[in-house]
């Protein structure tokens, strides 16, 4: 019978399919590092035990950021990788504990992963990456030891795969403020959508950035955009897409760079780079960081969320209409 450690590793290997993996920013195309290893090669190089390397800690911080950012599927993917990077340090100890207490090693390992996950969700994102690593390891060892000292070798009726799936959805249970809509304030959703798009276009025209937007519009209209990158639209918007023959909607963030430098991000939130660095060491920085070699970058979408800037869904026709109005002024 496979234990949770084996299941984690097999899941990551299956998902990566032997292809190079980017643990810096998650997307090889957006990463400035030219060469990326396969997951097997990456896992062998990582050192998170007593002899932690600077490179390994930076990679740990980036993977932790990826496990907090993005959509639910991406967060789940990187959280499983985060856990799998820890399992090499649990293997020998769990076997020895199983022999000493005559306990099933698979149960001990399941308890350890459960402990590491509980630390991940309990600690949240506002702590330094090294402290998070130490806490997850400590909680994992404590959970394994606590299981055998309880004196009853019982196997959980829920499979390990189900436990991972449930845990990775835990942080989505809380109702977000952005999910609350005041229906009385919405008179005509279709008109609201067009006004939003036209306001975006007028702003882009005044900023001199409309040519950049039109390049994106041409790419979308020509069908060069991957369907996986197209945003999910409402039933009402499907009707408009039927007229065009394709989903042309995009988000405001698609017009922006995916990442900015650490210094730029600090300035955006009103901090100097040195202040932001001090806050990062204390775990009080309002945004999360990716490491690309010796450089730090920050997700623009993360900054938009922090600054309460809505990542609006717009249609190229509306954006161009708004820009044309301003151009005629």
Image (cartoon, rainbow, N blue to C red):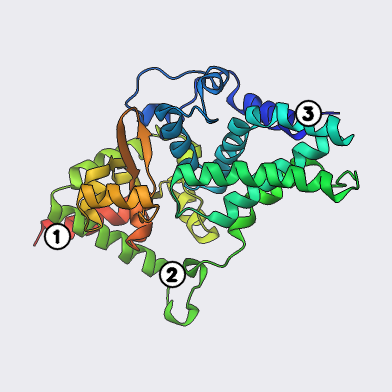
The residue indicated by pointer 3 is 95
The x, y position of residue 253, in whole percent, is 34, 49
Depth-wise, is mark 3 or mark 2 nearer the camera? 3
The x, y position of residue 119, in whole percent, is 60, 51
Instruction: Name, please, the residue furthest toward the left.
Output: 329
- Where, by quadrant of the figure, is residue 213 drawn? top left
Crowding at dot 2, Cα within 10 Å, few <14 / some 14-19 / many 20+, comes out as few
- Where, by quadrant of the figure, is residue 190 drawn? bottom left
Q: Secondary structure at mark 2?
A: helix
Please determine whether, in this image, residue 197 is positioned above or below residue 46: below
The residue indicated by pointer 1 is 326
The residue indicated by pointer 2 is 189
Number of marks drawn = 3
Mark found first going from the N terminus, 1 or 3: 3
Would residue 63 be found to the left or right of residue 88 on screen?
left
Q: Residue at x 55, y 38 (%)?
A: 78
The x, y position of residue 214, in whole percent, is 25, 42
Q: Residue at x 55, y 19 (%)?
A: 44
Q: Residue at x 72, y 31 (%)?
A: 93
Q: Nearer the viewer, residue 284 or 267?
A: 284
Asked whether the residues under the numbered discs 3 and 2 touch, taking CB atoms below 8 Å apart as contact, a structural biologist would say no
Would residue 301 be found to the left or right of residue 164 on screen?
left
Q: Which mark is residue 56?
A: none
Crowding at dot 1, Cα within 10 Å, few <14 / some 14-19 / many 20+, comes out as some
Mark found first going from the N terminus, 3 or 2: 3
């Amino acid at each position: 019978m496979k234990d949770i450690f084996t299941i984690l590793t097999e899941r990551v290997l299956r998902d990566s399919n032997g292809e190079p993996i980017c643990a810096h920013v998650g997307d090889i195309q957006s990463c400035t590092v030219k060469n990326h290893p396969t997951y097997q090669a990456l896992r062998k190089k990582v050192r998170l035990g007593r002899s932690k390397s600077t490179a390994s800690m930076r990679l740990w911080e980036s993977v932790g950021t990826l496990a907090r950012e993005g959509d639910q599927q991406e967060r789940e993917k990187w959280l499983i990788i985060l856990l799998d990077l820890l399992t090499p340090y649990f293997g020998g100890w769990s076997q020895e504990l199983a022999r000493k207490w005559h306990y099933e090693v698979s149960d001990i390992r399941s308890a350890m992963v459960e402990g590491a996950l509980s630390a991940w969700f309990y600690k949240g994102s506002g702590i330094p990456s090294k402290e998070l690593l130490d806490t997850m390891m400590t909680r994992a060892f404590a959970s394994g030891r606590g299981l055998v000292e309880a004196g009853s070798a019982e196997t959980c009726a829920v499979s390990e795969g189900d436990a991972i799936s449930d845990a990775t959805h835990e942080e989505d249970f809380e109702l977000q403020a952005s999910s609350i809509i005041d229906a009385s304030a919405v008179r005509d959703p279709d008109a609201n959508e067009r006004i939003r798009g036209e306001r975006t276009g007028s702003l882009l025209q005044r900023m001199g950035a409309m040519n950049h937007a039109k390049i994106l519009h041409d790419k979308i209209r020509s069908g060069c955009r991957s369907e996986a990158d197209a945003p999910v639209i409402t039933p009402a918007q499907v009707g408009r897409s039927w007229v065009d023959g394709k989903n042309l909607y995009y988000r405001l963030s698609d017009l922006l760079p995916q990442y900015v430098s650490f210094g730029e991000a600090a300035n955006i939130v009103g901090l100097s780079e040195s202040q932001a660095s001090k806050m990062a060491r204390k775990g009080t920085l309002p945004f999360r960081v990716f490491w690309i070699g010796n450089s730090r970058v920050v997700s623009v979408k993360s900054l938009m969320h922090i600054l309460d800037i809505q990542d609006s869904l717009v249609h190229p026709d509306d954006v161009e209409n708004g820009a044309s109005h301003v151009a005629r002024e």
